[in-house]
Amino acid sequence: ELIPISYDSDRPTVSAKRLYDFLQVETPFHKWFPRMAEYGFSENSDYAELRGQKCPTNNPKNPWTEFTDYQLTIDMAKELCMIQRTERGKEARQYFIQVEKSWNDPATIMARALKMADAKMKRLEAQAEEDKPKVLFANSVSGSKTSILIRDLAKLISQNGYKIGEKRLFEWMRRNEYLISK
């Protein structure tokens, strides 16, 4: 791995600072990146700003300094490599092309889709578990054909598997804004 790739978002990205270090650019990073961004790149489309990144220094009194880094899309990183016109730029560009090929490989796409489906299933299961008391409450209320006393409603809910008394039901209904608290 020439330059670490991040797969945390919907597409692979790379740190501008890591790319800069690999390309061995002589211009200071804080001047280089804004100049490169002027080539028609758009923030939040081609790159995202990451403020407050920490970098070690040689100063014993202040061993860390903060700087702004950027997460670049692979497409932007490839273009920056071409702009540099160096052997290292060519090497990095070939590396990014290979990363892109493996990202778009059908097996990799299927693995990402399965991972996303699994995460969605877990979220839905957690949501269903969280909504369980509300569903029991709604089923109990909808089973009633007329108005109902809170005491009787608490009994119905308890019969449906969620143990609750009259006072706790009042408290729960106020807390969840089914009843006005004042």
Image (cartoon, rainbow, N blue to C red):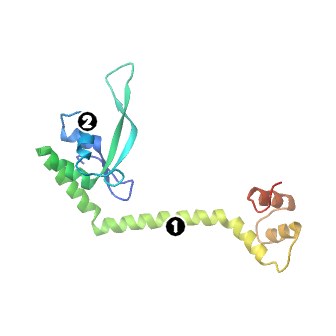
Q: Is residue 122 above or below residue 12?
A: below
| Residue 109, position as x, y percentages in the image | 33, 66
The residue positioned 58% from the left and 66% from the top of the image is 125
Q: Nearer the viewer, residue 15 or 48?
A: 48
| Circle 1: element type | helix
Number of labels in the image equals 2
Q: Which residue is mark 1?
A: 121
Which amino acid, by three-letter code, is at mark 2?
A: Lys
Give the residue displayed 39% in from the left and 55% down from the top: 9
Amino acid at the residue labelled 1: Met
Seen in the image, is 136 located left or right of residue 64? right
Which quadrant is home to the C terminus?
bottom right
Q: Residue at coordinates 24% horizontally, 43% vertically from top-left? A: 19
- For marks 2 and 1, the one nearer the N-term is 2
Residue 131: give x, y in percent of width and height: 66, 65
Residue 139 sits above or below residue 131 on the image: below
Find disc 2 in the rendering and name its residue: 31
